[in-house]
Amino acid sequence: MSQQVDPTRIPGLQAVVADALAEARRLGASQAEADASLQQGLSVTVRLGEVETVEYQRDRGLGVTVYFGRRKGSASTADLSPDAVRDTVAKACAFARHTAEDDCAGLADPALLARDPPDPGLDFPWELAPEAAVALALECEAAGRAVDARIGNSEGASVGSQRGVRVYGNSHGFLAGDCATSHSLSCVLLAGEGDDMQRDYWYDTARDPRDLAAAAAIGRIAGERTVARLGARRLPTGKAPVLFAPEVARGFIGHFVSAIRGGAQYRKATFLLDAAGQRIFPEWVRMDERPHLPKGLSTTYWDGEGVRTQDRVLVQGGVLEGYLLGTYAARKLGLQSTGNAGGVHNLLVAPSAGAPSQAELLRRMGRGLLVTELMGQGVNGVTGDYSRGATGFWIEDGAIAYPVQEITIAGNLKDLYRGLVAIGGDIDPRGGIRTGSVWVDGMTIAGE
């Protein structure tokens, strides 16, 4: 294969996948699927005005899954040579002959596969030389350090650019590939005043480098956020409204997404078991999956099994309309794949009436906590119990009063979702879940 990773590599990867499928048939497999990929990337980090790392990364891989009736075997390799492909298929077949039968095993229904999917339009290469990447990172960090004299240290500024090609095919006749890029800029700074030391960050990520915020702007925001945290206090233990900033609200909504995945449902390991058709949120809440969103970070026309993706209303009137299903989970539940093998594809969380800004939500909240960062993994997906370390700002009279730290916010996700008060129009596009600030009424805050 050529050293360059670009759309011209798709036919070569399709040939690798086709060879793997043909070899599986030759060895007696009743069904088979294979995916091949190439990735290359450049990442640069600077710290305190000096270059720390310049890394070039290139990866390749092939994964093969075969079925002998209802028995399944899988194997993978980083070598795409013909001999390695044959060896990998042989190993997958050997594994399949020793596994137990599973009535739900097998490829996706042929009727659900994407046929002749269009180019998703996700390939925006960044012709970025290492020297230019270093210059951007230096500019970003310098802008952040210049915000305030109290910013005396840095964890660095980074620039990253990735480009990858993937091809998936199966023995039902599906064979497709695409090329996609992802680019990022970030900065992490530290500020001190007396014995008080604080750290904060900012970043941007996009498919198209032209959509990235300016390096100096990212550094400046990182600096302003870091200085704003100086003088942070603890809060007394009690209950108060909480507003999740968009960059952390994404994770808060993400727990709902995890709870409605097919794997969690058929394993009965979710606090939203059998919740389809039930009201989970207030009646004004709506969420839509938009898998074909231009330049979306989770955009795709086919999922990890070749099933076509399509626009879908996931929550309407606060009611869960259905689950996120791949083929295996769908069969376990007696349902049909929703094209979500691999996860949700661009979940858009609609703002509440008037699409209020974060400032407007704070004014309406009056008194409470604005959360800007979460720590720890204290979420129980089975019970819905939620407990996370948090930092942010205490709100009085609808405005920021002072920064807070070393607190824990807690509740049960079922109650928290039902207790949503509003969702802001300050939507963060930097992820597969797009949401604005999320206002939750009455969380327990553990502090002093």
Image (cartoon, rainbow, N blue to C red):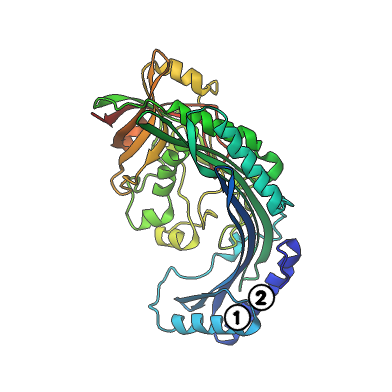
User: Where does residue 391 sit, x and y in percent of width and height?
Assistant: 38, 33
- Where residue 164 sits, quadrant-wise, is bottom right
For the N terminus, the quadrant is bottom right
How many neighbours does mark 2 have within 10 angstroms: few (below 14), some (14-19), or many (20 or more)? many
Who is closer to the viewer here, 249 or 68? 249
Q: Is residue 256 above or below residue 334?
A: above
Q: Is residue 261 above or below residue 8?
A: above
Q: What residue would you read off at disc 2?
A: 16
Could you tell me which secondary element the residue under label 2 belongs to? helix
> What secondary structure is found at the residue carrying circle 1?
helix
The answer to whether the residue labelled 1 contacts the one labelled 2, judged by CB atoms less than 8 Å apart, is yes
Q: Nearer the viewer, residue 34 or 200?
A: 200
The amino acid sitting under disc 1 is Val
Residue 366 image position (x, y, % from top left):
39, 15
Q: Is the residue 150 above or below the residue 334 in the image?
A: above
- Counting from the top left corner in percent of width and height, residue 400 is at 42, 19
Task: Please determine whether, in this image, residue 374 is positioned above or below residue 356.
Answer: below
The amino acid beneath tag 2 is Val
- Residue 311 shows in this picture: no
Quarter-of-image position of residue 426: top right
Total marks drawn?
A: 2
Q: Nearer the viewer, residue 326 or 335?
A: 326
Q: Residue 395: x percent and y percent?
A: 39, 19
CA gap between label 1 and label 2 equals: 8 Å
The numbered dot on residue 85 is: 1
Q: Residue furthest top?
A: 397
Q: Is residue 400 something one can see in this rendering?
A: yes
